[in-house]
Structures are given as C-alpha cells and as structure tokens.
Amino acid sequence: MKARIEELKEKARSLRIDIVRTLHHSKSGHTGGSLSVIDMLTVLYYYKMNHDPKNPKWAGRDRLVLSKGHAAPAQYVALADCGYFPKEDLKMLRQLGGHLQGHPDSKGTPGIEVCTGSLGQGLSMAVGMALGLRLDSSSSRVYAVLGDGELQEGQIWEATMAASHYKLDNLCILIDANGLQIDGEVAKIMGVEPVADKFSSFGCHVVEIDGHDLQAIIKALDDAESIKGQPVAIVARTVKGKGVSFFENKASYHGVTPSDEELPKALECLGESCNGGEK
C-alpha cells in the first residue's frame, strides 16, 4: 500500500500541474477549489471507483457527481488523464466550440454524469441516482462531492434528510471543507459549522479527515462501503489552492486563474519547470 500511496501522490501532483496549465491557458475558471479537491478526485478515479473510459455509460460504473461544479477543471484533468477524451481538449476549457464548459455538462463531455454548478442541487441528483441503482439491484455506488460554502443551501439538507430516510448506504457524500468561498470566509458569510455534527444529526455516518492525506481518504472510502443502513458523509478539511503556496488560503483565487507572471512560480511550487520538465 505504501507504494500505491506514493503513486497516487505523484498522480495528484501531476493533475495539479494540469489544472494550473489549463486554467492559465483558458484565462477563465476556478483555481482555489480545483486545487483543494483534486486529492479526493485522485483517490476516487485512480483507486476507488469502478469506471471505464472506453465505455462511459457502462451500467456497472460507480457515479461521481461534482456538486461544486465550479471545480470542473479538477474533474476534467482527471477524465482526460484517464482517457475519456484527449488531453489536447483541455486547451478548449471555456472556449467556443469546445466541450469543456465552465461547469460540468453531461450532454457534451464523456464521463460527466449530470450538469452541475447551480450550488445545492448536485446532492439531490445523487440521491436520485442512488435510489435508482437500488431499485435496479445494482452494486454500484454514488459519490457526491460538495463544497462547504455550498452547505449554506437549504436543498443540501433536504437531500441529506431524504438520503437518511431511504437508508441510502450506496451514497457517499464528500465535503471539500476549505473554509473559503468567493466572497471570503465561510464562517463570516454564513457559518455552517459544526458540519460533522449536522450531517450526523441528519442521519449520516460521519467521518472527519485531512482531505489532503491520501491514506486517510482511502481508509474513509474503504470503510464507507462497510456502513449499512445509512449514507456516509466524509468531512474533508482542505486548503483552498493547495499545492501553490501563494494561492493557498486565499479567497481571492476562488475564480481567478494564474497570470503569465504567476504560471512559472506556480509550476515551481509543484516541482515542474515552465517548459514541462521536472525541476
């Protein structure tokens, strides 16, 4: 497992580089939340989920709903790296004629399950998927990735209440709790803590972890499969902009992309030179 963890760490580093390069090229998109969530997406796509890039609609696949849809660049780089579409397509992020919209689009992008980005709605769709899979007697699981600022939406709690009521143990909710949203600190704008206690009070089995500790993410996801009769909520404490020191913990980089001057410095933080080689 130690070797596997190291492989996943290197994959997460590589995907962070892809995120930074993609956002710099597009001049539009969300940097902070993409970098904070990528460790969880790395474990999901490269360790945990059953999925097939050659057959995106395979009935036996696990489903991933990126409810915090503005972090789409993180999902796009993972999908491209897995082979759902050519990496060259990343250059068309948010460009006319491209299929990589600013928020996930299930109609245009292979590997995207549902259109998300209207915050608060993704978990409701994930609940519907989990119910449908159970009706089909499917062993597939649903993973819903939320942001902590998104928890300010009332629909999140209605969906959680439904997930608990229907005992959806095939649903795993991951909260990318980086403490920041577009206008500043979540706690100052509309406090959502204690997050873990709230999900527990709504009937979830709750685990709280360091969202950048790959071993902790793996354990939480593995353990989630053994929980029966209730959904699982993994509260992952993360750092907005993780991996690039001058992006970290800054709300100003929520929806701002790396400038021409910042790109080489950001790549250096990630152990990469601007021309593509490791330093």
Image: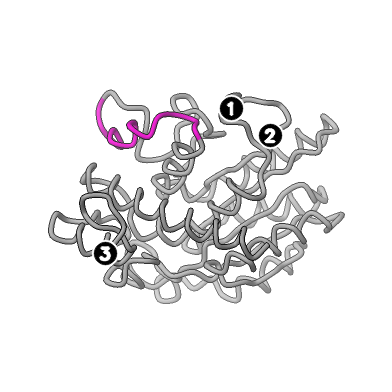
Q: Tell me the residue that label 3 is attached to.
A: 268
Asked which secondary structure carries label 3, the reply is helix
Disc 1 residue type (three-letter): Pro
| Crowd class of label 2 (few under 14; some 14 to 19; many from 20; radius 10 Å) | some
* Picture layout, residue 257 above or below residue 245: above
Q: Which residue is mark 2?
A: 61
Q: Nearer the viewer, residue 236 or 162?
A: 236
Q: Position of residue 156 (x, y in %)?
A: 59, 54
Q: Nearer the viewer, mark 1 or mark 3?
A: 3
Q: Which mark is residue 36?
A: none
The question of residue 87 being in magenta is answered with yes
Give left or right: position of 190 versus 127. left
Q: Quadrant of residue 253?
A: bottom left
Q: Which residue sits at x=32%, y=60%?
A: 254
Q: Nearer the viewer, residue 38 or 270?
A: 270
Residue at (45% x, 46% y) in the render: 69
Q: In the picture shown, does residue 87 fall above or below 160?
A: above
Mark 1–mark 3 Cα distance, whole angstroms, equals: 35 Å
User: Which quadrant of the rendered structure holds the C terminus?
Assistant: bottom left
Pointer 2 or 1: first along the chain: 1
Q: CA distance from mark 2 to mark 1?
A: 8 Å
Q: Position of residue 237 (x, y in %)?
A: 54, 71
Mark toward the start of the polypeptide (2 vs 3) = 2
Disc 2 is placed on an element classified as: loop
Name the residue type under label 2: Arg
Identify the amino acid type marked 3. Glu
Q: Which mark is residue 56?
A: 1
Q: Pick whichever, 13 or 127, lies toward us.
A: 13
User: Which callout, 1 or 3, points at the residue further toward the start of the chain?
Assistant: 1
**Is 43 situated above or below 86?**
below
Q: Which residues are magenta?
A: 83-96
Do the residues under discs 2 and 1 have CB atoms within 8 angstroms?
yes
